[in-house]
Image (cartoon, helix red, strand yellow):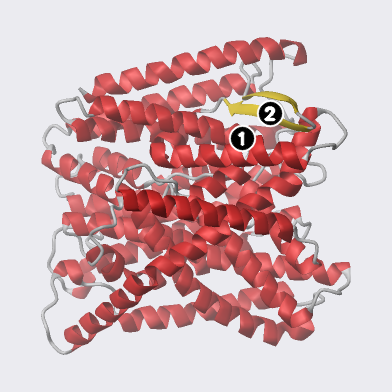
Amino acid sequence: MDLATVTGARAPLELTLRGVLLGGAITLLFTAANVYLGLKIGLTFATSIPAAVISMAILRFFPSSTIYENNIVQTVASAAGTLAAIIFVLPGLVMIGWWTGFPYVTTAAITMTGGILGVMFSVPLRRALVVDSPELPYPEGRAAAEVLKVGAESREGGEESAKGLKVILVNALAAAGFAVLTRMRLAAEEGAAFFKAGAGSTGIIGGLQFALIGAGHLVGLTVGLAILTGVVIGWWIALPILSAGVPGAAEEVANTVFRSDVRFLGAGTIGVAAIWTLFKIIGPVAGGIRSSLAASRAARGGAVVAVGERDLPIGVIGLVSLGTLFPIAWLLWSVLAGGPLEASAGLLIAGSLVFVLVLGLVIASVCGYMAGLIGASNSPVSGIGILSIVAASLMLVGMFGRDLDPGTTQALVAYALIVTGIVFGVATISNDNLQDLKTGQLIGATPWKQQVALVLGVIFGSLVIPPVLSVLNASFGFAGVPGASADALPAPQAALISSLAKGVLGGDLRWDMIGIGALIGAGVILIDEVLARTGTKLRLPPLAVGLGIYLPMGVTLTVVLGAVLGWFYDRAADRARDPEFVKRMGVLMATGMIVGDSLFGVLYAGIVYETGSDAPLAVTGPDFAPYALAGGTLAFLVITASLYAYTRRKAR
């Protein structure tokens, strides 16, 4: 049944129950994968293209299916998968000791309310940032549209769908297989060498994980080199200086100083870069909102509005947005009730609702623009989370001051994290929505039906995320939490964001490091703007530089390698008979790597949870570690080369 028939509209099958359910099923896999990947390496992947490929492969068996129905499937799965980025905030509540696990209703409510507001806030931006901003490339939105178009054109044979699905499966199996070897301790997960650099310490670290290669392929060379620039600044310049004279082994000193000092340089860089982005887009966003309101008035006056321009009515957007504030208020009250902040609940909740509305609208604009410029996968929404937690914490300092007992301070940190979690839901969904709406525009889909599908995707994702988080927490725990296993998930953004909240509210935040990071960010912005004016393709995205500074090098160096490999792959694709098809297959290859690695991680978490062992698959001991490193590195490189060669053959 087409859900559009409820309104009496006649249209090709688009928003169907079948498509919504299929999108929900794909959501279960991709959301779980994104949760694990985000906690492991601080990066998530866009699910639009793989969802579209899987949808086409399945729906081709139904004669009545259409390109528009496939688009709804990828829209649902994309929204749900993207919402998994909420894990950049919520694990902080466990890290500070406020939660011992992830209460289902509270976790789902934080995720769902923020996500629904993200959909509502981004609808008026469609005209400004999709229709009236042709200069924004929307890389993933355009790629997804091309996949859908080619799939529809080859419906009879389904050649690209079949090839694409096979490429995803082969790469996923290879990535998962290598992950099995690392968990058996037959291959190393990471290679590292720490050493003294003058009076200080530093190192070189590379992760042997296919998810990192895939992520690097997707972000591209420009972002990859910007991340490498951040690595150089953070690990090979700042770290030796800051660790000079600190006693201890090089590895211990480097890791300690990185966590306590260097990552705050990245926070400062990301904060300045995010503010700069906001200033650049205020004008276009304001103009687009005025255009959207004018279109709504014209429709109410009886003017005919083309199908491709029919958004959800502005009145519905307003009512849903205001209606969502009631469950948010209930959620915040449930957090405050019975605690040291209960006496100030009214003031806190009122201030927080205004904060969510105002900052949410700003963030929706910033994230929508960033996604249009560099893609949803590349857009570092964690930088927006950093700004949000600092703003929320400063709001609470203004209300309560800093000279408080430890229990009250902990409650304020937890409250700031929960408010930030809601705002972060707005950020993640806004980051994704406009990419999907660009896909819809390019294939002629109906915007309001996609917007309904986005809300459904948010609901699906909100229901899946809490149990996945609970299993991972019970199996691994998070780095820095007492009792965490040796394989504890680093959750880098959550660790940073919770540290920022404690620093602002406790008065001991490393403002000096953040200030220096802000100056670095200003310098990078200046260089990037100079490069832009020269007309060269070479750019230095400030947000990516900040990411390179504060993420562990074991993540970033392999991502850079993946970006370089992706550049060589795309250069070779330019010489092919159908370059765009070859490049799309490369995107599916990278996605398969990420999905296989990530899904095995979720499966392994379940095994750890059931067995109660930190290393249930290990078959070797510490003495085998040198062989695991040498053999694992060689196997990793050989398998990587083989997967690229296989994908090239399938693309011919």
> Residue placed at 39% from the left, 16% from the top?
642
Locate the N terminus and report the quarter of the image it occupies: bottom left
Locate the C terminus and report the quarter of the image it occupies: top left
Mark 2: secondary structure: strand
Q: Nearer the viewer, residue 605 or 502?
A: 502
Q: Which residue type carries mark 2?
A: Gly
Disc 2 to disc 1, C-alpha distance: 9 Å
Label 2 vs label 1, nearer the camera:
2
> Residue placed at 27% from the left, 35% from the top?
584
Task: Name the image quarter holding residue 341.
Answer: bottom right
Crowd around label 2: few <14 · some 14–19 · many ≥20 (10 Å): some
Question: Is there any visible trace of residue 51 in the rendered image?
Answer: yes
> Residue placed at 23% from the left, 35% from the top?
161
Q: Are marks 2 and 1 in contact (CB under 8 Å)?
A: yes
Q: Give left or right: position of 506 versus 277.
A: right
Q: Which residue type carries mark 1?
A: Met
Q: Give left or right: position of 390 versus 317.
A: right
Task: Name the image quarter holding residue 80.
Answer: bottom left
Instruction: Answer above or below: position of 127 versus 86.
Output: below
* Location of residue 508 in the rendering, given as x and y in whole percent from the top left corner: 80, 62
Task: Name the image quarter holding residue 63.
Answer: top left
Give the residue pinned by disc 2. Answer: 203
* Location of residue 533 in the rendering, given as x and y in whole percent from the top left corner: 33, 53
Mark closest to the chain's N terminus, 2 or 1: 2
Crowd around label 1: few <14 · some 14–19 · many ≥20 (10 Å): many
Mark 1: secondary structure: helix
- Mark seen at residue 553: 1
Q: What number of labels is visible?
A: 2
* Location of residue 529 in the rendering, given as x and y in whole percent from the top left corner: 40, 54
